[in-house]
């Protein structure tokens, strides 16, 4: 709901001095031998998680790493990855997650841009120019050899807990700096609004990579003594099997996963204990939500945020999933301010469309090494400009209208058109390229490209060209050769018109 912008405190706010590492230690003391993490047949107790993160934290520092150093981690979804995550939190190191679906070139960019000193990755991942290379298979030995003892190293002032790369609004991947305070706010928001009443009898099923949205659910469950069950890869069958076997009570999915779950015939007959099927990270079609409600009952919970304010701007609770709210992303979390600013930078009232802005302890510290981009995104009053367009309804529910810039979301992954265009343009025959997302029932959006060539070339050759250079989810699935691209008066290619033409043919 629109609120006056005046008289509010300016960000950045420091929410709490408590750190993520403290919460792991406390959970270890409080919940001891109870199961904290489960992956297949392997279980790790709270006490073991605390002890192993201490050991690995010290082992990492013993490899010559110093607090504040960036450590990239390319790890499969599983217990070891989570241990590494909290070991980095305890040792004052900065975690930089890499996505296994990206190419070595994309990884190289993140490593160079962040100045990573270390890389934890499977042995067969190509060597990158980092000082300290740690194989995933070395971790158990490092933990074993480190011996017992606490690891509690303060992060130097201003150094973030982790970096999360995002295309931001300009297309060049930038690292979002997230602090312990940001994570504390996320936990508080989840425990207060999304999953109140968690107990040791609850179980979170991580269907999606914990390096992305699902990871936000780890700590709220850990601090309440609840279990986190991790799947290495999502499939509807694997999810159903684990949800039934483990009596999972909560899970997180991007809309594409929800669609896959509903396509699976066994879903309707499953005996589930799920009370919160959380979804978000991308727009979800109301038709999909209606089908999900029919099949799964009133268990859907939508959360809206972005890398700069992870998952915690607005929430649509299970009891709010009815018409006409199904097209809404919900209302702001308790500790979060959200507004919609009109063109003049002032809040607009219900029914008017503008840019969604948000302020509070969930908002990132800034972009890594990019004060200019930070200043362009967080204004002097502390408002984070999300780049999303939306409007309020009369009851204060947010309806997201469109993305201000042209980010394509395919299968829950963000694809930045410019990166794809730049890749197409590295082909010698291509002179112009416009990349857009076209609606796709399964993936939400599919990548399509219109290109102008200076010589003979086929769409197949261009697809082959992209195959070596872009992760699968970024590759154009449909390429058309055009004589020219539509341009604005100042000569910019008009992606919007390209998209309309593609959708209408
Ligand atoms: P990322 O920074 O990769 O997490 O992407 C964030 C963007 O995804 C947001 O700025 C929105 O455009 C979109 N998004 C996230 N959550 C939702 C949601 N619940 N509904 C619609 N769009 C969403």
Image (cartoon, helix red, strand yellow):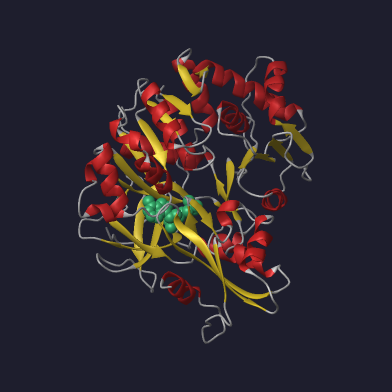
Residue 50 in percent (x, y) is at 55, 20
Residue at point 38% right, 46% down? 259
Residue 57 in percent (x, y) is at 65, 27
**107 and 198: which is toward the camera:** 107
Q: Quadrant of residue 174?
A: bottom right
Above or below, comparing residue 340 to residue 93 in the picture? below
Residue 250 in percent (x, y) is at 36, 32
Q: How many marks?
A: 0
Residue at point 72% right, 29% down? 61
**66 and 308: which is toward the camera:** 308
Residue at point 46% right, 35% down? 207
Above or below, comparing residue 470 to residue 277 in the picture? below
Position of 473 with respect to 228 (left or right) is right
Residue 17 seen in this snapshot? yes
Q: Looking at the rendering, in which quadrant would you find the C terminus?
A: bottom left
Q: Quadrant of ligand 1?
A: bottom left
Q: Quadrant of residue 56?
A: top right
Position of 246 with respect to 151 (left or right) is left
Position of 326 with respect to 138 (left or right) is left
Q: Looking at the rendering, in which quadrant would you find the N terminus?
A: bottom left
* Farthest bottom residue in view: 489
Residue 290 in percent (x, y) is at 26, 48
């Amino acid at each position: 709901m629109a609120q006056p912008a005046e008289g509010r405190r300016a960000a950045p706010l420091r929410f709490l001095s408590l750190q993520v590492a403290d919460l792991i230690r406390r959970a270890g003391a409080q919940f001891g031998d109870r199961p904290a993490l489960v992956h297949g047949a392997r279980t790790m107790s709270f006490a073991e998680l605390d002890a192993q993160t201490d050991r690995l934290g010290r082992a990492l520092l013993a490899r010559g790493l110093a607090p504040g150093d960036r450590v990239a981690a390319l790890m499969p979804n599983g217990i070891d990855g989570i241990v590494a995550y909290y070991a980095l939190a305890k040792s004052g190191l900065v975690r930089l997650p890499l996505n296994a679906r990206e190419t070595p070139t994309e990884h190289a960019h993140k490593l160079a841009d962040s100045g990573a000193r270390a890389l934890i990755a499977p042995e067969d991942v190509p060597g990158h120019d980092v000082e300290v290379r740690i194989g995933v298979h070395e971790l158990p030995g490092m933990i074993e050899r480190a011996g017992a003892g606490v690891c509690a190293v303060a992060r130097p002032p201003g150094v973030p807990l982790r970096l999360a790369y995002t295309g931001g609004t300009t297309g060049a991947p930038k690292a979002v700096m997230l602090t312990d305070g940001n994570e504390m706010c996320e936990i508080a928001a989840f425990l207060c609004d999304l999953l109140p009443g968690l107990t040791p009898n609850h179980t979170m099923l991580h269907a999606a990579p914990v390096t992305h949205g699902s990871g936000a659910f780890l700590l709220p469950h850990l601090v309440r003594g609840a279990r986190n069950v991790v799947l290495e890869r999502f499939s509807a069958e694997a999810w159903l099997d684990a949800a039934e076997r483990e009596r999972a009570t909560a899970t997180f999915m991007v809309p594409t996963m929800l669609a896959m779950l509903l396509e699976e015939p066994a879903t309707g007959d499953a005996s589930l204990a799920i009370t919160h099927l959380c979804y978000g990270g991308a727009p979800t079609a109301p038709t999909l939500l209606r089908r999900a409600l029919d099949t799964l009952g009133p268990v859907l919970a939508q959360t809206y945020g972005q890398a700069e304010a992870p998952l915690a701007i607005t929430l649509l609770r299970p009891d709010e999933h009815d018409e006409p709210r199904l097209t809404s992303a919900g209302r702001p979390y308790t500790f979060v301010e959200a507004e919609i600013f009109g063109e003049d930078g002032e809040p607009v009232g219900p029914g008017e469309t503008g840019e969604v802005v948000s302020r509070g302890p969930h908002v990132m510290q800034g972009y890594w090494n990019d004060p200019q981009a930070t200043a362009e995104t967080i204004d002097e009053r502390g408002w984070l400009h999300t780049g999303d367009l939306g409007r309020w309804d009369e009851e204060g529910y947010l309806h997201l209208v469109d993305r201000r810039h042209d980010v394509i979301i395919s299968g829950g992954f963000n694809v930045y058109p410019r990166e794809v265009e730049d890749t197409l343009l590295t082909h010698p025959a291509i002179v112009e390229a416009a990349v857009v997302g076209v609606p796709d029932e399964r993936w939400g959006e599919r990548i399509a490209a219109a290109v102008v060539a200076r010589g003979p070339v086929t769409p197949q050759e261009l697809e082959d060209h992209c195959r070596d250079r872009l992760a699968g989810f970024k590759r154009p699935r449909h390429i058309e050769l055009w004589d020219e691209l539509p341009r604005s008066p100042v000569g910019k290619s008009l992606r919007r018109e390209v998209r309309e033409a593609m959708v209408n043919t």
